Image: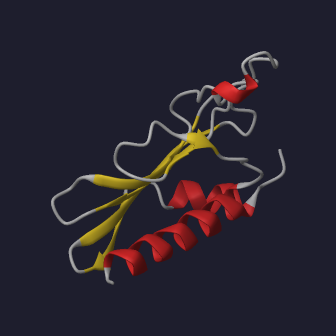
Amino acid sequence: MQRNPGIDTLLDLHGEIIEQGHGYWVSIEAWRVESIPEIPHGIRHALTLHEPYGKRILGYDNAHAVKPPKKFKYAGRILAYDPKHRHASDKGVPYGFRDAHELLTDFFAEVDRVLQETQK
């Protein structure tokens, strides 16, 4: 099997807690699972940003499916298994997972954006 540097990096970050300043922190969890149609890349992941009291305020994961928006009521019921949660009460919106490197890049760009907004 050919090695994937993005997947290897994501797996190497499993269990890391990364301080972001002002009490905010990032948690990264990633581990191999059996490849199935919903998780073809064979990686289960949860990348989260937490506020100083521990509440998750941003998350990218693939722990559950996200129902399509109601406007697609009569379309095929395609469920995305890589949602992102844009704030604490967000049930998740589909995230188009392409590869682990892009996942990390997108997540940390969003972390930077959220932290800039909280510092205003």
Out of 17 and 26, give the one closest to the viewer: 26
Q: Residue furthest left?
A: 53
In the depicted structure, whether residue 41 falls above or below residue 34: below
Does residue 104 sit above or below 68 in this rendering?
Answer: below
Which x, y percent locates residue 34? 65, 27
Tally the numbered discs.
Answer: 0
- The residue that appears at 74% across and 54% down in the rendered structure is 99
Q: Quadrant of residue 15?
A: bottom left
Q: Residue at x 63, y 65 (%)?
A: 106
Q: Where is residue 65 shown, x and y percent of the image?
A: 58, 27
Residue under the point 48% across and 61% down: 13
Residue 49 position within the rendered picture, expressed as x and y whole percent measured from the top left: 37, 60
| Residue 30, visible in the rendered structure | no
Quarter of the image with the N terminus is top right
- Residue 92 seen in render: yes
The C terminus, quarter of image = bottom left
Is 114 on the left-hand or right-hand side of 75?
left
Q: Nearer the viewer, residue 72 or 116?
A: 72
Q: Is residue 14 above or below residue 66?
A: below
Q: In the shown orientation, is residue 69 left or right of residue 55?
A: right
**Residue 69 location (% of width, % of height):** 65, 31
